[in-house]
Amino acid sequence: VEVLVKELLAGLAGRCELFLASDDTPETFQEAVVSRAISGHFSWNPRDDYKIQAGAFATWLQACQVDVVHFHLGGTYAMGTRSWSRSPIPRVAASGIPCVATNH
């Protein structure tokens, strides 16, 4: 989990319920310092089919009953955003969950 994400989570912990999607495996995520502040974790594997993951991610977020999703993108094409059919953002937005994104 990146430093910027760690700081964002530290600032929000205790003020709202937090869920995280990252390329960490369940095992490596449990070792991360931030795991204690997170209510749920979705393992996004950049080597897996993005379309399938996007649908599974939207379904997971709905099941978690999140209020808003922040996509903290690590680059212009992160999480398949070069193609809206592969990106999770339109799938999540179509499910009725408000989305915001930052890119660095």
Image (cartoon, rainbow, N blue to C red):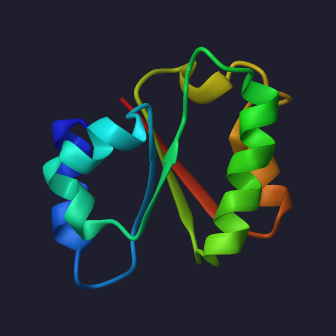
Q: Where is residue 25 in the image (x, y as percent from the top left)?
A: 41, 35
View extreme (top): residue: 47
Residue at left offset 73%, top offset 26%: 50
Q: Residue at 81% x, 29% y: name it.
A: 51
Up-down relation of residue 65 to residue 98 (above or below): below
Q: Quadrant of residue 13?
A: bottom left
> Which is nearer the eye, 35 or 70?
35
Q: Is residue 56 above or below residue 74?
A: below
On the rendered image, what quadrant is the C terminus found in? Answer: top left
The quarter holding residue 69 reads bottom right
Image point 40% across, 27% down: which residue? 74
The front one of 103 and 18 is 18
Question: Is residue 63 visible in this depiction of the protein?
Answer: yes
Residue 31 in the image, given as x and y percentages of width and height: 19, 44
Instruction: Name the residue at the front extreme.
Output: 27
Instruction: Say which of 73 and 49 sits in front.
Output: 49
| Rendered position, 22 above or below 17 | above
What's the residue at 33%, 39% (across, down)? 27
Q: Where is residue 10 in the image (x, y as percent from the top left)?
A: 16, 64
Quadrant (top left/top right/bottom left/bottom right) for the N terminus: top left
Q: Which of 99 and 92 is in front in this view?
A: 92
Check the image and name the residue furthest to the bottom.
15
How many numbered marks, from 0 up? Answer: 0
* Whole-percent x, y for residue 56 in the image: 75, 47
Residue 13 shown left or right of residue 82 in the figure: left
- For the question of whether residue 90 can be seen, the reply is no
Whether residue 26 is situated above or below residue 70 in the rendered picture = above
84 relative to 72 in the view: left or right: right
User: Does 70 sit left or right of 31 as displayed?
Assistant: right
